[in-house]
């Protein structure tokens, strides 16, 4: 019985593989198996005739791949599956919510994405391209998901010291007004990895992190992904 239990996992996979080729598989198991026998002879052996035939069409596909299996313990797997399942531009907010990790240990909103009064000029109607989070200068900034660094340097249009990470399939995140960064272009980073320190460089009125999410080159509301 011990030997049968040890081998049962292999036998089940082999049985399904045979069934996938169009062959008929007859399964014989001990009476103590979870599949209870319907008849047995005087010695207790299970009659093969009492077991159902397991069949599959010749063209049936049996896939044991686990690449599509994702859990809360594999957030990057969830994000990759989401991006590969459909065009990033057609992903709904309900589907994207929670797929990116927090760029700071604590997210304290300072200025939301969208139109606002400019903190620099005081003029109304400025479009704010990202989400600002309050953070003292020198606070660790983390990659929101695994990806490749495509920019690490000075942003001439107000972002100051800036890092951009490409997560694939048209999804990018940017981290702005940094006091310093610890990554280089072409570097692979992991979700949660420290990539920089927050600051107030560029067009900034105080220490904070300006975080952006870009879909196919266009900014979107970051809160729809966090």
Image (spheres, grey):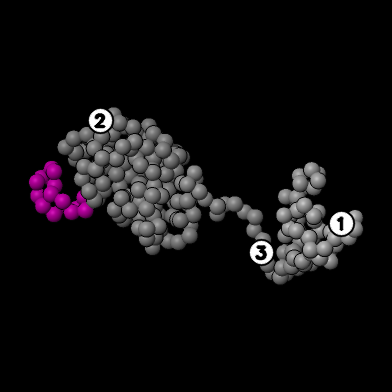
The residue carrying mark 2 is 137
Callout 2 environment at 10 Å: few (<14), some (14 to 19), or many (20+)? some
Instruction: Give percent across and percent down for residue 182.
Output: 37, 32
Query: Residue drawn at (85%, 60%), measured in percent from left and top?
Result: 40
Q: Secondary structure at mark 3?
A: loop
Are the two marked residues, 2 and 3, in contact with CB atoms closer than 8 angstroms?
no
Q: Is residue 103 left or right of residue 62?
A: left
- Residue 18 makes an appearance in the image: yes
Which image quarter: residue 6?
A: top right
Q: Residue furthest top?
A: 138
**Of 220 and 155, the residue lying toward us:** 220
Closer to the N terminus: mark 2 or mark 3? Answer: 3
- Principal SS element in the magenta part? loop
Q: Residue furthest right?
A: 42
The residue carrying mark 1 is 45
Instruction: Give percent across and percent down for residue 190.
Output: 45, 39
Closer to the N terminus: mark 2 or mark 1? Answer: 1
Q: Residue furthest front?
A: 42
Callout 3 environment at 10 Å: few (<14), some (14 to 19), or many (20+)? few
The residue carrying mark 3 is 61
Magenta residue span: 114-128
Query: Residue drawn at (47%, 47%), measured in percent from left and top?
Result: 72
Q: Nearer the viewer, mark 2 or mark 1?
A: 1
Q: Is residue 51 left or right of residue 102?
A: right
Instruction: Give percent across and percent down for residue 207.
Output: 22, 34
Callout 1 environment at 10 Å: few (<14), some (14 to 19), or many (20+)? some
Are the two marked residues, 1 and 3, in contact with CB atoms closer than 8 angstroms?
no
In the depicted structure, whether residue 183 falls above or below residue 65: above
């Amino acid at each position: 019985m011990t030997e049968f239990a040890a081998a049962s996992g292999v036998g089940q996979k082999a049985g399904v593989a045979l069934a996938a080729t169009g062959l008929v598989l007859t399964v014989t198991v001990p009476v103590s198996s979870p599949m209870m026998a319907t008849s047995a002879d005087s010695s207790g052996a299970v009659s093969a005739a009492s077991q159902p035939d397991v069949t599959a069409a010749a063209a049936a596909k049996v896939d044991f791949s686990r690449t599509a299996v994702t859990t809360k313990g594999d957030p990057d797997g969830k994000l990759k599956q989401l991006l590969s399942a459909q065009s990033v531009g057609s992903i709904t907010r309900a589907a994207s919510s929670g797929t990116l990790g927090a760029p700071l240990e604590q997210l304290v909103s300072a200025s939301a994405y969208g139109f606002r009064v400019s903190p620099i000029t005081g003029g109304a109607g400025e479009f704010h391209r990202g989400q600002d989070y309050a953070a003292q200068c020198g606070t660790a900034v983390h990659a929101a998901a695994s990806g490749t660094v495509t920019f690490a340097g000075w942003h001439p249009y107000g972002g100051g010291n800036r890092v951009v990470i490409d997560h694939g399939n048209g999804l990018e995140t940017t981290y702005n007004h940094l006091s310093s960064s610890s990554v280089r272009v072409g570097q692979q980073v992991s979700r949660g990895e420290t990539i920089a320190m927050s600051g107030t460089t560029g067009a900034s009125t105080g220490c904070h992190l300006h975080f952006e999410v870009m879909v196919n080159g266009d900014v979107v509301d970051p809160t729809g992904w966090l």
